[in-house]
Structure formats: C-alpha cells, structure tokens
Amino acid sequence: MAISREQEEILIKKSIEAAPGAYVPYSDFHVGACVLGEDGNFYTGFNIENVSYGATTCGEQAAVISMLTNSSCRKIKALAVAAGNSCDSMPCGICRQFLCEFVESPEVPIYSVAMDGRYMVKPFSEVMPYAFMNFEKDGTDK
C-alpha cells in the first residue's frame, strides 16, 4: 500500500508536531501520532498518562479515536508514531491489536519517527505478524 511522498512528509511532520502536547507526568515520554485516513485526511493524537497505568491512552489510539470521532472514516491508510531520539519506537502490543480493527490491509505502512525527522517504515504485517484479525470484506472467515 503506497502513499504519496507528499502524504508521507505531512504524516511524519504532523506526528512530530503532536508529541509536545502529550500529558506525561509519570514517564516524561512524549509520543505523537498521525493517521492518514481512507478519506485522505490526517488525524493526530498524543499519549495521555494516568496514575492508574492501565487507564493510559497511547498516542496511536488517540489519533485513531480522533479519526473516528471527527469523520465517517473507519480505515487507516498509514500511521506515523513519533517519540524519542531514535526511529525504533513502534506501537506497543495493545496498540498493535487496537490497530488491527482499523488498518485497511496488512500492507498499511507504519512509520516509526525520531523527533529529528529520521524514520523507519514497516508494513503492518511485519509490525503485527499473525495478527488476530480478519480482512475479509463480508466479515466471514474462509
């Protein structure tokens, strides 16, 4: 699944721009995320920590929730996650399963972005191998 170079640049830039807004009083680890929806629009989010760690919302989840609440869009064409000084911060396990509901296909590109703009990109199928999901259009298992 390819996106245009312009879309890629916007996705990366918006993920970096989202990170400073994170509410991270416990870890001080800012994560920004940007989703390119099937509608061609960009939706951002950041991580929101809670003293009860299980109640924390990851940046990736916040970006998807932004897409879901601000459009009729239900599928992700690409996702960028910006955090830290290296480009190896991929979504956590819970986020990977959460994303299974919304990625358009196993080839959806997932960008891991360093705050200086360097990035690594992998298809969702490599980020979440053997995912518990179903890409069938009619929702039935084959």
Image (tube, grey):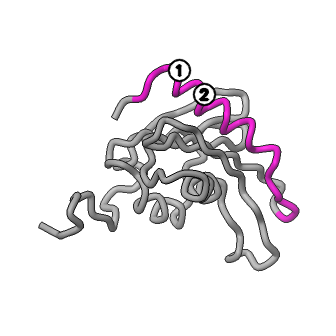
Magenta region includes residue 23 = yes
Where is residue 6? Give x, y as percent. Answer: 53, 20
Distance from label 2 to label 1 (Cα)? 6 Å
Above or below for 117 versus 96: above
Question: Mark 2 is on which residue type?
Answer: Ile
Where is residue 11? Give x, y as percent. Answer: 58, 33
Classify residue 38 as left or right of residue 45: left
* Label 2, residues with CA under 10 Å away: few <14, some 14-19, many ≥20: some
Where is residue 128? Give x, y as percent. Answer: 40, 56
Residue 16 - label: none
User: Closer to the camera, 46 or 139?
Assistant: 139
Above or below for 28 versus 112: below
Q: Residue at x 65, y 45 (%)?
A: 44
Dot 1 corresponds to which residue? 6
Question: Mark 1 is on which residue type?
Answer: Glu
Task: Report the magenta stretch's main SS.
Answer: helix
Tell me where the magenta segment starts and ends, as one range.
Answer: 3-26
Instruction: Label 1, secondary structure: give it.
Output: helix
Dot 2 corresponds to which residue? 10
User: Closer to the camera, 125 or 105?
Assistant: 105
Residue that lies at the very extreme toward the front in this rendered image: 72
Quadrant for the C terminus in the image: bottom left
The number of discs equals 2
